[in-house]
Amino acid sequence: MANLFVIFLAMMGGIATALQGQFMGLLSVAMGPLESVFITYSGGAVVVAMAMLVAQGGNLKAWNTVPWYALTSGLMGLVIIGAIGYVVPRLGVAAGFTVMVATQFVAGAIIDHYGLFGAMVRPMDLTKALGLGLLMAGVTLLVR
């Protein structure tokens, strides 16, 4: 039952990601990519700030207990959001996200294989390599 909830949550995240990509594409075309990112981050910041107020500040004091590179996650988010806003109106939602998600799989496989940034080591094997190869073939078919 718990796995069904996690799968449902992942599906909702996927739907929200596709919708966000389309909405950010509309903002980017009408206003510009920087403005699109600003609106996206501002809206998210307001919601998170309200949630943290309800949670009485959360655990922000622990910021200095994480590795320095974990603190760059906001910068990574800007790259992601900026790429979505710029790529979707130019390639389309499906093609844009296909390239982005496939690249996530490749990067994730590298991070797993070497255990980078504190990840558990999950070695690359022939099956995973074949899966990544098939994924890249699918990307090529979808984007062309």
Image: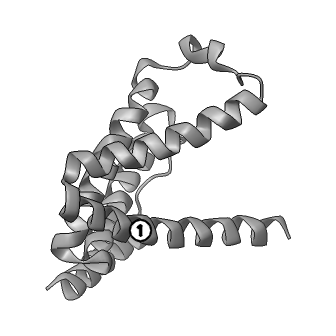
Of the pair 17 and 30, the residue shown nearer to us: 30
Is residue 129 visible to us here?
Answer: no
Q: Is residue 101 left or right of residue 60?
A: left
Q: Is residue 79 above or below residue 83?
A: above
Query: Which amino acid type corresponds to the residue marked 1 in the rendered image?
Result: Lys
Is residue 78 visible to us here?
Answer: yes
What residue is at 42 percent from the left and 64 percent from the top? Answer: 20
Residue 41, position as x, y percentages in the image: 42, 43
What residue is at 66 percent from the left and 35 percent from the top? Answer: 50
Residue 116, position as x, y percentages in the image: 41, 36
Q: Is residue 141 above or below residue 43?
A: below
Q: Is residue 35 above or below residue 26?
A: above
Q: Which quarter of the figure has residue 13?
A: bottom right
Of the pair 43 and 65, the residue shown nearer to us: 43
Badge 1 crowding class, 10 Å Cα cut-off, few under 14, some 14 to 19, many 20 or more, is few
Q: Which quarter of the figure has residue 42?
A: top left
Q: Determine whether the residue tagged by mark 1 lies in a helix, strand or loop.
A: helix
Q: Which residue is the site of mark 1?
A: 128
